[in-house]
Image (spheres, grey):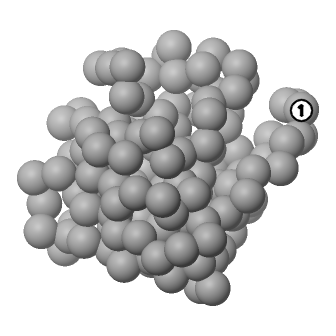
Amino acid sequence: MGGINPYHKATSIPTATRPFTVRLAGHPTTIEVRPEQLPFGRDGRPGSLLDILLNGGRVAIDHACGGVNACSTCHVVVKEGLESCSTADEAEEDMLDTAPGLTPQSRLACQCVPDGSRDLVVEIPSWNRNAVKE
């Protein structure tokens, strides 16, 4: 579906320029991300955590709105490497306010685009953990 909500101001976010990994906290999955492969699919913003988790790592994470920042079902917590991710805009922050279990490291996977400067450790909150499969 893509990662841009037509009701929000569209902004361009650059994707990663160097290889990095995304590891799921408490789960054996580690995804190797190569910039030349991005985007993997059409879920969320190009190069977003949602795109990486779903299409690069085959991790089933709920995203009821199709990855366009219209719900909070793809809420994740970036435990390590948050500083290498795009900054949350006001629309994402407003949507995050509706997510259960919000933390200072919370992001919507559909909007969070890593730049590749750090490896990431991402936690899928416990209320959504049943969606993770090996």
Neighbours of disc 1 within 10 Å: few (<14), some (14-19), many (20+): few
Query: Percent from the top left, x then y, of residue 1?
Result: 73, 61
Seen in the image, is 37 located left or right of residue 8?
A: left
* Residue at 85% from the left image edge and 42% from the top image edge: 11
Asked which secondary structure carries label 1, the reply is: loop
Q: Residue at x 17, y 51 (%)?
A: 25
* Left or right: where 57 falls relative to 125: right
Where 118 sits versus 18, above or below?
above
Count of residue discs: 1
Instruction: Give whichever of 35, 130 is nearer the camera.
Output: 35
Pick whichever, 124 or 78, lies toward us.
78
Q: Position of residue 56 (x, y in %)?
A: 45, 77
- Horizontal placement of 17 versus 7: left or right? left
- Residue under the image location 13 percent in, 60 percent down: 27
Q: Is residue 116 above or below residue 65?
A: below
- Residue at figure coordinates x 73%, y 58% from the top left: 14
Residue extending furthest toward the bottom: 36
- Say which residue label 1 marks: 9
Compared with 63, 17 (above or below) is below
